[in-house]
Amino acid sequence: MRTFECDYTEGAHPQILEALLRTNMEQMSGYGADPYTARAAEKIRQSCGAPDASVTFLVGGTQTNMIVLDLLAAPFEGVLTAETGHINVHEAGAVEFTGHKVIGLKHRDGVLDVDALDAYLAAFYADATHEHMVRPGVVYLTHPTEYGTLYTKEQMLRVRALCDRYGMKLYVDGARLGYALGCPENEIALSDLAGLCDAFSIGGTKLGLLCGEAVVFPKDAPKHLLSQVKRHGGLLAKGRVLGVQFDAMFTGRLYEAIGREAIRHARRIREILLSKGYPLAWESPTNQQFTILSDAEATALSKYVGFDLWGRRDAGHWIARFTSSWSTTDADVEELETALPQKTALTE
Amino acid sequence: MRTFECDYTEGAHPQILEALLRTNMEQMSGYGADPYTARAAEKIRQSCGAPDASVTFLVGGTQTNMIVLDLLAAPFEGVLTAETGHINVHEAGAVEFTGHKVIGLKHRDGVLDVDALDAYLAAFYADATHEHMVRPGVVYLTHPTEYGTLYTKEQMLRVRALCDRYGMKLYVDGARLGYALGCPENEIALSDLAGLCDAFSIGGTKLGLLCGEAVVFPKDAPKHLLSQVKRHGGLLAKGRVLGVQFDAMFTGRLYEAIGREAIRHARRIREILLSKGYPLAWESPTNQQFTILSDAEATALSKYVGFDLWGRRDAGHWIARFTSSWSTTDADVEELETALPQKTALTE
Amino acid sequence: MRTFECDYTEGAHPQILEALLRTNMEQMSGYGADPYTARAAEKIRQSCGAPDASVTFLVGGTQTNMIVLDLLAAPFEGVLTAETGHINVHEAGAVEFTGHKVIGLKHRDGVLDVDALDAYLAAFYADATHEHMVRPGVVYLTHPTEYGTLYTKEQMLRVRALCDRYGMKLYVDGARLGYALGCPENEIALSDLAGLCDAFSIGGTKLGLLCGEAVVFPKDAPKHLLSQVKRHGGLLAKGRVLGVQFDAMFTGRLYEAIGREAIRHARRIREILLSKGYPLAWESPTNQQFTILSDAEATALSKYVGFDLWGRRDAGHWIARFTSSWSTTDADVEELETALPQKTALTE
Amino acid sequence: MRTFECDYTEGAHPQILEALLRTNMEQMSGYGADPYTARAAEKIRQSCGAPDASVTFLVGGTQTNMIVLDLLAAPFEGVLTAETGHINVHEAGAVEFTGHKVIGLKHRDGVLDVDALDAYLAAFYADATHEHMVRPGVVYLTHPTEYGTLYTKEQMLRVRALCDRYGMKLYVDGARLGYALGCPENEIALSDLAGLCDAFSIGGTKLGLLCGEAVVFPKDAPKHLLSQVKRHGGLLAKGRVLGVQFDAMFTGRLYEAIGREAIRHARRIREILLSKGYPLAWESPTNQQFTILSDAEATALSKYVGFDLWGRRDAGHWIARFTSSWSTTDADVEELETALPQKTALTE
């Protein structure tokens, strides 16, 4: 049975695997000092229109968030995020492990409420005791968000303006960035991220790499970056494994093509869900589609197709997630269409 | 002009100072290995009816919370607290500095909403991804709370029951504990804390010590406690300074007497506020009394008497705090009564 | 030009790559909850004769040391190691990042001096102030060591006995373990490690994986291991990448075969070095061979063959390292024999 | 029986206590925002000839070292110290608790060997793998050292020059600084420290305060200092307790007078030791005097006078410490002279 539970259920995109195979026996220096890593970084700089950017490759998403935030924030600074932000909910306290408070603010379908951010900062600095409080040092956004939603350019510009006003850094977690870039509705290009952020990541794991996230510091790279990454346990001996994969991913615009194709599938999944009577929990333009199921419906549906019980909506109801990815095929979606019963039939 | 801004504006209670003077030239070993520290610990054990308790003395409140929570929680565990809890708001991230996430839950006038705690824990363990989340390890309560309010015994028993059910520790921050013990409404005696908590603190600084908080571990003291305190920078070379003060404080029930007397003054402050037209922001049975002032009223009133602009109620209004303490005298309260204008007169 | 600089200059062993290819499009759950990870763990348990062991897979060596030591040691405990230990020298402070002091002791060609360990512990506990010192919690050994040398069984038994006497844990870093297992001189089998250690690692990266280290806790696995690994940024979304590789590595005794073959090459490298007049810096029975070169010789030799300037022996002399690995072929060694000039010819 | 075991066996110098008494009932703001703290800081700036220095007051010595080093060092930087340095031996890992490696170098009677420092740094930066090693960020010196010895001005200038050459900070731990300043042999005045250091402490606890260390940042104070101190658990609510004491200590040159007087006593203790046949373990010009005793002698002598078994010299011999302090009187020293038997008589 095909599962649509998440976007990392398979290994790697064929072109990625092929690149690993092709370069396998080439002798290269370790720790990222190989030509593929250099080339991948250069291609990403070009894709971002950021010729002076520092580009580094890390293995996983939580690791990336933990390291980047620890490098951007002064030791005594905290990180502001939507309360639904991955770092606040699903990283087992990795950011706090590095000593930083994560401060959750209001959100709307996963998008940080910029008014709430504005109000928080105004209140913070108006408070006579704020030296006893955790200083906001970095704003963390995910794009797409955990809800599959996207920031508008205006929202991101407002966040940047607040960062400038209050001396904060902006970091965008792009674990699923390719699925934003593949969206017609997306207003934030790689070059926008390079212009607006102090750092952002370009997720590889969920876009078809065995593993790997690229981190871009458009302007000022942290000092002694390799050393700091190693100190956090994030330096890969065979850095080539990341370099070769990202080099392939940014060759011939593969990254964008993967995103676009997955979004095409997601649109069909959305239509299939709606046509079979499954209401959308909210509108998501990206590769994750969310519907609402009662407990009984969830149990019944799980016999037909694999999906993710993403979270509780309330006692008695689940939010269920159907995800497309780099590995989704037309046949998969057709299989879904065939397998998915009318929602009303689930509990008959 | 007399100020009622907080309960640590003076030095030490005369009997405390006297004890420091009297013992000043006695030669004693350092780091708490002196007879006064031993005696103070023994008196506290007796006051708590906890003959096997471990009692330790630390210098300050944030230090105490940071150390005790770091010792109670496994490294990967987080701390649950009312979102208004001191550790969540006013300790500059000291708990996160030690690697623990602080998770803020709903409150009612500073009292942790036990239903919200219950719901949080039920949802946490029902969540299939909870191994990716921060495990709740300790519940942190303040008694009295930051709002001057008190837990009922029933509330605290319910929290304890939840701790038992979910394998958590309970820590009560008693930075102002004496002002609870001095309250007729208080339902939580020292012996109750010893029976219910894994650790609690008995605050000295706000009750008339130059500095010092006692920490009680009723049952299982953390291993190598002295070493762990030192590692956190909390071990005082002249441990006698804390031992002598607490020994005096727990001689002849001084601690309770101080609390009772301050509460008597707080009751009169409350009456004075009400009689002059200052509404209570909420009912506080302890030594902190809160009223609401418009910005203009706050400015005007500050010419008559010292108080604390405790926090914003909304745009345009402050919550103002008037505090009694071990140092408050009848004359002080009379001075307040004389100085305090009718609220209506403030902005005429 | 062939380089013998280290044992991670190529990608992955063909059988490893083949397994990744073969399983690539199978849909599996993430975070190690896949059948290949389970199977790899089971095979390792069998290889170790430790049916109750917990086996976990991590990405890199420094990450492994950082996480395992942080989980074995109480927060206030330090780690004892030969002063040449990888964690003490070449991990950029990753262990200290997690709050533990690393205490370096005397060594002999990279082997911790067990007498020095014994003396350190005796002196520590005889010191009346030892509660002010960092408590020794874990002994860290590498096998093979950074010098390519091996512990004797007697040495390791003595270390274990000291751990038992002083309530410490024993962790063996096996980043190059396969190259010990492939040695006729090696006295420490996997089952010995399982019997003696509280944890040990079985390195994959240097034995022919793209990345990956297995961690074995023979008896008591740390609680909430997945959660703790995630908190340290070490949890891989596509855990299969590690599971599939280790499953292949422990199929048909590939791990041992790789080690044996590399040792065969190392012996020939050793003979070639000696026959051409290059003295051994010390005897190493494993895959790293060390010789001494003057600065001028090092410069001259680097035109003929790739090797590692491993470290300074003194002003004017280098210790140079030649390494065999899973990827070394007879042809490589023959090429070395041909390319390597007589040492005396280097500076003529 | 009088004990000379250490310099913190009594409470506070009478003038310090008197200042606390005199100011006890003055109402002041907390957290160091009181006039006495401001005045003490100003007096210290004047004493140091450093009108722009930032002066802060902390409670204890380990706390001071932990906080200052964590603020001076970048998160990934380590601290270089004599291997005998207090932070390396007797602070229970407080510096590592904040994530920094402490790197011990050779010493001579407690004085960091500047040649060894020079060699370490040269080797570090010559090492091609130094990005995998802990970057040296701060040099930590104690003055006087743990052995009672003093740096010469030339030594300290050389250390400063190395700091400048390698981009490091210099911190001098002056827990016993007053006893250096009181020495005719001392070449390092407060103004020298202000000129050479990035930070230094002026110890109060061992010079006659109940508790308290002043920290001076001559040039660039760390940002948000109060907030950072609080985050480390080091902010005292009644900051006045430190301000009032240091204000008294720097009034009428009391600090220097105390030091001078204690040194006068130490000289007599030294003469008494020598005249009774007790050899000096090494020459110490400050308030700590060290002699060598066999185990039997140590046991015998402890019946006549209190002293500290400072450490093992070898199996069978102790180094014993006799300390003068602010509280030592002529009568005390005379008592020592009377009580101390000829060494040869000890084991007869």
Image (cartoon, coloured by chain):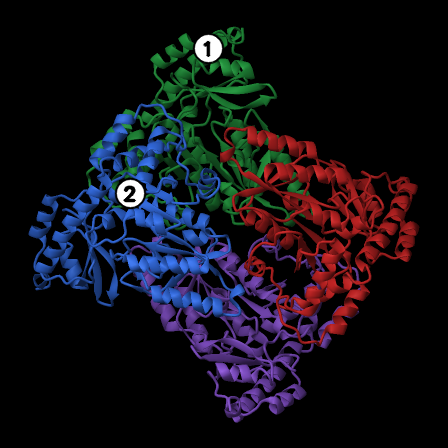
Chain colours: A purple, B blue, C red, D green
**Mark 2 neighbour density, 10 Å: few (under 14) some (14–19) many (20 or more):** many
Q: Which mark is residue D143?
A: none
Foreground tag (1 vs 2): 2
**Left/right of residue B108 with respect to residue C241 in the rendered view:** left
* Residue identified by numbered label 1: D271
Residue B75 position (above or below residue D323):
below
Circles 1 and 2: CB distance less than 8 Å?
Answer: no
- Position of the N terminus of chain C, as image quadrant, is bottom right
Q: Is residue A204 left or right of residue B103?
A: right
Percent x, y of residue B121: 43, 65
- The amino acid beneath tag 1 is Glu
Residue A275 point in image, percent of width and height: 53, 93
Q: Residue at x 81, y 55 (%)?
A: C256
Q: Amino acid at mark 2?
A: Thr
Which numbered dot is residue B205?
2
What secondary structure is found at the residue carrying circle 1?
Answer: helix
Q: CA distance from mark 1 to mark 2?
A: 45 Å
Whether residue D154 is visible here, answered yes or no, is yes
Quarter of the image holding residue C245?
Answer: bottom right
Quarter the C terminus of chain C occupies: top right
What subunit carries mark 1? D
Q: Residue at x 42, y 12 (%)?
A: D268
- What x and y, as percent, mark residue A108? 42, 76
Q: Chain of mark 2?
A: B
Foreground residue, B177 or A268?
A: B177
Quadrant of the rendered image containing residue A39: bottom right
Regarding mark 2 in the picture, which secondary structure is present there?
Answer: helix
Find residue A247 and report its horizontal and vertical position in percent.
69, 70
